[in-house]
Amino acid sequence: MSNNWSMKEIVECISSGKVAGYRLAIPEGYTVKQIEDLLVQKGIADRELFQKALGANYPLSFLEGISETGYERLEGFLFPATYELRPGMSEEEIIKLMLEKFQTVFTPQLQQRADEVDLSVREIITLASIVEREAKLEEERPQVAAVFLNRLQRGMRLESCATVQYILGKQKETLTTKDLQNPSPYNTYLHTGLPPGPIANPGASSIKAVLYPADGDYLFFVARGDGSHQFSKTFREHQEAARKYQKM
């Protein structure tokens, strides 16, 4: 109800038997833990019940073969969108709704494209989650995706700060040497290839960026400080760009 409603409108609402719902927006790039915190903060979910629901059986093909438990099990697949939630929905029902939304977004056409580039759905979403956390501008996501795909093809480490921040569980503007030496398998500064799983829940544009990356031989990028990035093909170019924008 609204404070601006007249008495007639209030009476009609009550007498109609309509049940109000919750409109909840899940931002792109949120982790499962952040989604949990948001639901608890809004009074929509209970923390313990949500964590228990993460381990429930959801018979969806894209979850087959995932052995992880806890937050990592569904990381990447709770699709970020605006949801209409009815009062009394269980934590399991809310999670199922988000998983089914992912299934709707990841269309048969996108699945076919994934098969064409020889990547599993989980691999696509893992890389898309890194792109989601690294790229600030919509138009740069295909370029960021191309950089990571080029590095993978050349056997180079991804060296994504976002993967280290995922390990730390918080955002840090500047990572320390100690941070970069964290032995976690999610640390792409130490380990080659993709991390074990997604580090966030990516939106549709980041997923499509991985499936349809930009053309080019770029292997590096550095933040300009305004949300955009300078892309480079060689390490020397990258060093020059880094020196330039670190001074600004």
Image (cartoon, rainbow, N blue to C red):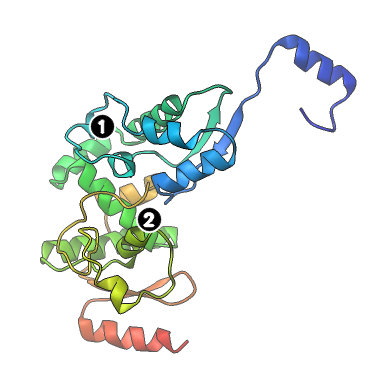
Is 183 left, or right, of 221 in this rendering? left
Is label 1 in a helix, a strand or a loop? helix
Q: Is residue 76 visible?
A: no
Residue at the image position 16 percent from the left and 46 percent from the top: 119
Task: Identify the mark nearer the N-term, 1 or 2.
Answer: 1
| Residue underneath mark 2 | 132
| Residue underneath mark 1 | 108
Is label 2 in a helix, a strand or a loop? helix
Residue 213, located in which quarter of the rendered image?
A: bottom left
Camera-nearest label, 1 or 2:
2
Q: Is residue 123 visible?
A: yes
Taking the view exactly as shown, the residue that stands out farthest to the right is 7
The amino acid pointed to by label 1 is Pro
Q: What is the x, y in percent for residue 201?
A: 37, 46
Callouts 1 and 2 close, C-beta under 8 Å: no
Residue at the image position 15 percent from the left and 48 percent from the top: 117
Answer above or below: position of 9 versus 124: above
The amino acid pointed to by label 2 is Glu
Which residue is nearer to you in this view: 31 or 118?
Answer: 31
Residue at the image position 24 percent from the left and 33 percent from the top: 63
Residue at the image position 34 percent from the left and 84 percent from the top: 241
